[in-house]
Amino acid sequence: MTETLDHTLAATGEGARRADPFPVKGMDAVVFAVGNAKQAAHYYSTAFGMKLVAYAGPENGSRESASYVLVSGGARFVFTSVIKPATAWGTFLAEHVAAHGDGVVDLAIEVPDARAAYAYATAHGATGIEEPHEVEDEYGTVVLASIATYGDTRHTLVERSGYTGPYLPGFAPADPLVEPPRHRNFQAIDHCVGNVELGRMDEWVAFYNGVMGFTNMKEFVGDDIATEYSALMSKVVADGTRKVKFPLNEPAAGKKKSQIDEYLEFYGGPGVQHIALATNDIVATVRAMRAAGVRFLDTPDSYYETLGEWVGETRVPLETLRELKILADRDEDGYLLQIFTKPVQDRPTVFFELIERHGSMGFGKGNFKALFEAIEREQARRGNL
């Protein structure tokens, strides 16, 4: 009976969490440090269709920063800008924006036990930034801790099972900035991609393996991920439930500057390159976001001439894929549809991916060449290829 129960648990997410040395529940939030959080919140409300749910600023006791919390299904973004730095955290945020422009400062992960997660991580080599501590208000108590990862990025470990508020203590509920769309553009964060310096990808893969107990999910090297002019290498680490997935990229030798080199130059070092958002209807989402002003990478018509031969039938007709410039890929488990935005700030750094999965847990390997050629065309327009 015990063996049967253990086998059943191991085949479920709960079983995987129990077996993991560093169990996680999922992504808690992607936290951005930005120059103007009010304007960023408005952009992501109107262009991405997200809903403002919480706010912290001078009006409710936050004297040095203003933060806006937006959600779309289970995806949560937090945009913070500094008003007047008064603490080490405020100074760090101000320096982060000065060095990197608008970018991701924190990939926060929800965990069942923040104290145990922090203890495991630091015992296995992680650099602790904040030790576990409780914060509370009328909605309950949250336990927080944080560790450092690549560049100036951190992982805040969030234990919120005893909390019912809109985000964290100190945040007040907020009304939407605009009327949310009837169609939810995306439901969750699928994965978050980090760019690191040449020769350091394996170091950070080992970090996630050892410090957080993540396992290697995919690996892309050589011709998998190269064009005529540039190349990169990528490995994907994930927790046992595959709810938290972190692809890690580094540049590789090529004739010209790769997209990773460009990112590292303009971001001023390693950091989060793009965030993939899971959608149930990529066609409706792309149409809505295009209409709201979001600009996507272009794909030449030649890509679609042979697409049907190797991808086969998908729920979206080939002509619709061609019209909207959506990419498709198939593996042994199923297929996926995906599209990438152009950078969403003036620096050619952070961008987004929309992904609709039908069985496939891949990352669009069959599209790498087309995607990177599209990025190279944008690099050439910027004079950075």
Image (tube, helix red, strand yellow):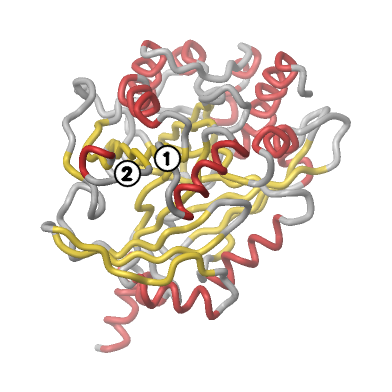
In front: 146, or 135? 135
Q: Are marks 1 and 2 in contact (CB under 8 Å)?
A: yes
Q: Is residue 78 above or below residue 297?
A: below
- Picture disc at residue 133: none
Label 1 CA crowd tier, 10 Å (few <14, some 14–19, many 20+): few
Residue 89 horizontal/vertical position (percent): 46, 53
Quarter of the image where one finds residue 25: bottom left
Front residue of this view, candidates 69 and 279: 69
- Total labels: the figure holds 2
Residue on which the image places disc 2:
63
Q: Secondary structure at mark 1?
A: loop
Q: Nearer the viewer, residue 178 or 288?
A: 178
For the point 58% across and 68% down, which residue is it? 209
Looking at the image, which residue is at 33% across and 23% down? 42
The kind of residue tagged 1 is Lys
* Residue 28 position (above or below residue 24): above
Q: Residue extending furthest bottom? A: 2
**Image quarter in which the N terminus is found:** bottom left
Residue 94 placement (x, y as % from top left): 51, 41
Q: Does 320 sit left or right of 7 as displayed?
A: right
Secondary structure beneath dot 2 equals: loop
Q: Residue furthest right?
A: 255
* Residue at left offset 52%, top offset 19%: 296
Image quarter (top left, top right, bottom left or bottom right) of the C terminus: top right
Residue 67, given in percent of the width and then of the height, sits at 33, 39
Q: Quadrant of residue 126?
A: bottom right
Does residue 184 appear left or right of residue 155 in this picture?
left
Q: Amino acid at mark 2?
A: Arg
Estimate the spatial distance between the alpha carbons at disc 1 and disc 2, rounded to whole Å: 8 Å
Residue assigned mark 1: 84
Please give left or right for residue 279 compared with residue 169 in the image.
Answer: right
Tell me where residue 148 appears, x and y as whole percent: 55, 61
